[in-house]
Amino acid sequence: MPEKCADPAAARLTQAAACAGGDLGRGGWMSVLSAVLWLPQAALVASVLSGLLDGTATDRTIWLAAGGFAALGLLRAAIQALSDRVLVEAVDHVLARERAELIATQGRRSPMSSGPGSAAVAALASEKLAMLAPFLTRYRPSSLRVRVLPLVIWGVSLWHSWAVAVILLVAGPLIPMFMALVGMAARDASERQMDEIGSLNTLLMERLNALVDIRLLAAAPRVVAQFEGQADALRQRTMAVLRVAFLSSTVLELFSALGVALVAVYVGFALLGQIGFGAWTTPLTVREGIFLLLLAPEFFQPLRDLAAAWHDKAAATAVARDLVEIEADTPSALLGSGVAVAPMSGPPSISARGVRVAVAPGQVVSYPDFDLPAGRTCALIGPSGRGKTVLMSALAGLVPIAGGQITVAGQRLTAETADAWRMRVGWIPQSPHFFAETLQANLRRAAPGATQAELWRALSAVQAEDVVRRLPRGLQTRLGETGTGVSGGEARRLMVARAALGRADVILADEPTANLDSETTAVVTAGLLELARNGASLIVATHDPVLVAQLELRIDLGDVA
Amino acid sequence: MKPLWTIFRLVWRADRWTMTRGIALAVVVLVMGVALLGLSGWFIVGAGAAGLAGTGAIFDVFRPSAGVRFLALGRTAARYGERLLTHDATLKALAVLRARLLAGIARAPFDRMRQVRGAQVLNRLTADVDALDGVALRVVIPVVAAVLTLGLALVTLSWLVDPAVALWSVLSLAIGAGLALALAARRSARPSRLAQAMSQAFRVRLIDHLRGRSMLAFSGQLSESEAAVLAADTRNRKHTLEVARIERRAGALISASATMAAAGALLIGAEMARSGTLAPSLAALGFFATLALAETVAPLRRGVAEIGAMREAARRVTRMLDSPVEDGGGSYAGAEALADLALQDVTILRPGAAAPLLTSVTLSVAPGESLALVGRSGAGKSTLLNAIAGLEPVAAGTVLIGGTPLLKWSEHALRIRLGYLPQRSALVSGTIAQNLWLGQPEADAERMLECLNRVCLGDVVARLGGLEAQLGEGGRGLSGGEARRLTLARVLLRNPDILLLDEPTEGLDRDTANRVLDGIRQACPQAAILIAAHRAEERAWADQALALQ
């Protein structure tokens, strides 16, 4: 059952790793090679120490062996560093690719399609994808070492002494059991700890978010004390879990320590001649004994590395699951590629025939047919939920239609023509969006070459000069999350000013006066009509009867189909 | 390094006793590991020598083999204890660090507090605090344990084996690890900082790109924006690779020094054994112990990788910890009488703005009276309330609370007299009672329910299950209008002399709005109320109105 659930995630991880070519594999094998080099090092040490006992050691052999030991050790360090480098660079490649793919798909998702929010996608693209790195650089190489090294060392041990091989073999079949045991426990432990940190962070963020209120209520000392209490309760719960979880990794350490101790004791007794069995060449030589003792810890080391890296796998699997989930639904994309092209030519008339749009899987909305000659103003009316925003989006090529056809400036609106069509359209969305840059840069997005005079003229159309003058740094104010805010009405006015600056031939405005006070509504309405007076077609989705009355035409979508 | 030291002191004070025991056990684990390998090496070579000499029968095998078993088991047990203690200490440190941060920012000037509300700043702050979680576990405890173990090894090996072997082993390990740490701390700070900054930029640009993708499609900038997002990621990854490179070098330095330590110990010991000044078994002891001593410096590698990021995080977090106290030194504690509110020629100019937001506002509200501020959105109603509450500076003119200028009031006394419901008011997860408790810790259930009824929330709360009903993060479980009224009830519970309300009935239907407005007056009959009015009901309810131009 868990096998089945983990499968798509595991496949996704393999797929992610595959794009690094063979580099991840090469890096892993290098780390194996680096670990294997311990064998000749151990052999050199054994030769020196046994040479001291049987008197065969000379100045030259000692220097050669010590020098060889040092050289091999440095070589190991170098190979390990190289392995790290290959792995880290391969992972860099994987991350670059995964991020680019995710962003390309999500960045072209139709604004009308369902799917994860921007913050969730950003979290996945940045820190969550980064969690693949420790999995690929630590967990996978150590799981490769687990498959190779114990086997090699066991074989070498068997060559010299079957008794030592038996001791290791007793631990050998236990390895998968250890792994499962340790794996489960370590996963549990690290997840608990992550949860703990996660909950603490949530608690902290929430309080930081409410800090102005807390200060106004003079509640800071109470809140800090409460936070400490909650944190302490969390700690106690976590420690209760950790006490059990750490036990199982202690079992692994215990067995590996006992394994090494048994080898040491066996070798000692064998060398003393008190144990006469266990070696092929009786008695076991000193050199063999020392060699075996040096190998024994390395038999268990890969396993310990793997246990230490277990959490990396759990984290990466969670990320892979998110990826599988987000990739499972193929969102409808906006038409065209969103790049700047030559604007479509011809008078910007719009007509719709039998237009149907899939707003959700299995839910298709049909729209009445209509023709809008160029340069006219038109209200799009209908009750909430009828799909006004969807139709506006379809007219702009932001959402693909499921049936019928939309003709703009005499051409059919398709993926090929959408970019050229949008070059002539100005968009005033229902919820204003400002990019994290200066107000001036935001306004100029629609008209990169606009002069200061043109900027101020566009602002004056919606009486927004004062709004700008009162901002801390005027046009240079950075709007957005951390910047100074403007009120909802001011934001709408600035959106109209931006559309005015773009000199678009067609303006699509979605509920431009919703939730505004009457004064601001009047200003926004006047601004929109001013755009129309300058020759633009104007389509406004609205509930506002006053606004509707000032427009020439109307398209009534009727009741919910 | 000073900020990092400050953070460590904070963490250390969280629970010295647990931390000390954790470090002690970490040393025990390392020492037992060294002893285990050293004893094993000595035992085998000694046994080999005895076997060759034919004196195997009189060689004492039992004490060494018992020692090996004892050390193997003891080390495992000590390791368990060490992990428990150090994790306990770390969890305490996590909590302390966050609590101190909370307390620190709670004292900060209001503009900084408001900055912290942005998701971007919150994200970075969380990332910083997370980075600091490893200060004790991955830097300080391993370093202290390594220093103590190496010191102990120096003395013991000098005594058991030979000072030359001991000095060589310990010094090469210490120098290697020290250099690696210094290298990493110095070199990785900059790329860590840049990687962090670029990763933030990547996130911000990506969110911007996704939220603004329709707008970008209209200006034909979708691909350019995508390229800008990816460019931030490319730079982020470049700096991350740089950090990895430094870590790799530091790691290689540690490995190399461990190799040289062992090779040297082997050489010196073997040469002495050959010349007869040292027993071969003791030479083996020296070599095996040195091998195990490498375990003392190996854990530092992880800390080395993070120390650059930690320094950066510590620098930012310590700044938050001891933020300047907002309280302008005012000490006025207020008189017995109810305070009234008066503004004389108040002008508000945002720093850097060309035109003042408000000029020469003069008004007064006596106890029991109410005044509505009206004007179109953006006219400065909210800003004026913020200024009266001390959240924003006044460029000219005076705000008088109970006849005393705002700046002369002590923060604590001012908050008792002045209740303010700002436009954006947040709830926290927990019970409804806990949220109200923020407003007034002494209020009992009866008083809380009374206040909830005043704002027409009595039925809602009863439906949810009473005062002990749980709310989710940020007050989830209540609708927008209900959450708004709960924050209102929280302010009313304080029964302040002066009540500043910013659009208190936003999002309510007309009937409920009127009942809530009447409830406000009933809850605080003597309060001087200043209300930023958005809708006709609020304007009609107030005794007087003042239009802001």
Image (spheres, helix red, strand yellow):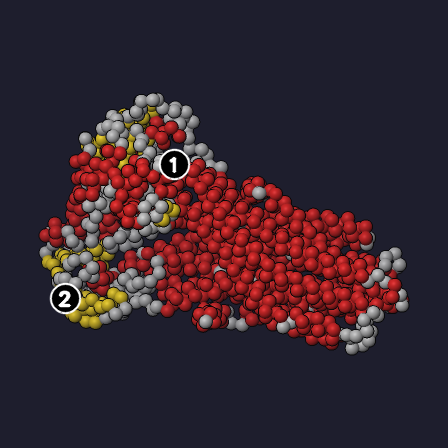
Circle 1 chain: B
Q: Residue A42 is drawn in which quadrant?
A: bottom right
Q: Which residue is mark 1?
A: B441
Residue A239 lies, in percent from the top left, at: 54, 52
Label 1: how many residues lie within 10 Å, few (<14), some (14-19) or many (20+)? some
SS for callout 2: loop
Viewer-closest of B394 and B42 = B42
When the figure is inspected, residue A49 is found, relative to residue A283, above or below; the finding is above
Label 2 sits on what residue type? Pro
User: Who is closer to the viewer here, B199 or A526?
Assistant: B199
Q: Chain of mark 2?
A: A
Left or right: where B387 falls relative to A545: right
Tag 2 residue: A368
Q: Is residue A456 visible?
A: no
- Picture quarter with the N terminus of chain A: bottom left
Query: Considering depth in this image, is A135 or A304 the residue closer to the camera?
Result: A304
Of all residues, the one furthest to the front in this rendering is: B446
Specify the quadrant that holds the C terminus of chain A: bottom left
Look at label 1 and name its amino acid: Pro
Q: Secondary structure at mark 1?
A: loop
Specify whether A78 is left or right of B152: left
Q: Are marks 1 and 2 in contact (CB under 8 Å)?
A: no
**Image spot of residue B171 (x, y percent):** 73, 51
Vertically, is B38 above or below B3?
below
